[in-house]
Amino acid sequence: MDRLEQYRIFVKVAELGSFIKTAQLLEIPRASISAGVQQLETALGARLLHRTTRSVSVTPDGAQVLERVRKLLADADDIEQLFHSRSLQVSGRLNIDAPSRIARRLIAPALPGLLRTYPRLQVGLGSSDRTIDLIQEGVDCAVRVGASRDSSLVVRPLGHIAMINCGSPDYLREYGMPLSPEDLRQGHWCVGYSPAAAGTEAPWEVAGQSLALQLPSQVIANNVEGYIACCVAGLGLIQIPRFDVQHLIDAGSLIEVMPQFPAASMPISLVYPHRRQRSNRLIAFIEWFESLMKQHLE
């Protein structure tokens, strides 16, 4: 095992805090992971990791080495790919994560174009409506909607997603077409939305301001698929990104209401660990995703 490989193993163990998880992620035996770290510690003459039966943590010496080794590995990756053409540079697996609707409605249908451009690229596509730990779950890049406050990640803002208000034809026949926020006080309902991670129901908003009146809801969804389905079923009004429901509006299953009073647009960004800032796979994906999202941003 060469020194560069020992460095890579050490960085991954430090990030994951586990020899077992590192072995699983790198798909090499746990004994090789332990041996690689021990050989590196012997070569450097310093203890890099605290080991207990329950956890692994970085020592003060290890923290100094970790900071320098991350830069060294990034430079090594750049050198290895320096003289290849761009399409040949972009190879291997890139694990990405996105909110379920963005993954289903935007990313998945467009992936064939990305893979035709970079035939040696393999994409691992995860989709969920929860905020994941990128390092713990081995994710290279994630799409985030809303504010991102994780200082351990690089945040690349892409723009803002337009929001609209919607109701089903059956609902609007029963409760009437609201023309202004004041009309909502006349017996209207909304479909509640409370993502599992949030624990609280999202309020109804007008131009970024919550209404003094909290619209009542008979059903509260914890994911976007259920949120939209309940609206189509006539259970209340919703506020949703336009791209999520435009096909339902075109089909007549939903009707946009109060277009002059939408909720504030939502910021969307890509986030990724600092260590992957110069990955060619990541750069290619960022450029592709930015182009994909342009038509959906304000």
Image: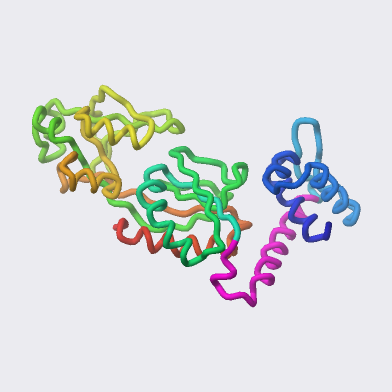
Question: Would residue 166 be found to the left or right of residue 243 on screen?
Answer: left
Does the segment drawn in magenta span residue 176?
no
Residue 107 percent location from the top left of the image: 41, 53
Q: As drawn, which residue projects farthest toward the bottom?
A: 83
Q: Is 29 situated left or right of 125 in this image? A: right
Q: Is residue 7 above or below residue 244?
A: below
Q: Residue at x 31, y 33 (%)?
A: 227
Q: Check the picture and name the quadrant holding the C terminus.
A: bottom left
Residue drawn at x 85%, y 53% is 40
Q: How is the image coloured?
A: rainbow
Q: Position of residue 198 (x, y in %)?
A: 43, 32
Magenta region, mostly helix, strand or loop?
helix
Q: Tag count in the figure?
A: 0
Magenta stretch, residue numbers: 62-91
- Give the farthest residue toward the top: 218
Q: Nearer the viewer, residue 128 or 266?
A: 128
Q: Is residue 290 above or below residue 264?
A: below
Q: Is residue 78 positioned above or below 154 on the image?
A: below
Q: Position of residue 36 (x, y in %)?
A: 83, 50
Image coordinates of residue 113 in percent, x first then y, are 42, 62
The structure residue drawn at horizontal position 78% and vertical position 42%, both measured from the top left corner, is: 30
Q: Quadrant of the N terminus?
A: bottom right
Residue 45 shown left or right of residue 231 in the figure: right
Name the image quarter holding residue 58.
top right
Q: Residue 182 lies in what quarter of the image?
A: top left
Q: Is residue 165 left or right of residue 265?
A: left
* 281 or 71: nearer the viewer: 281
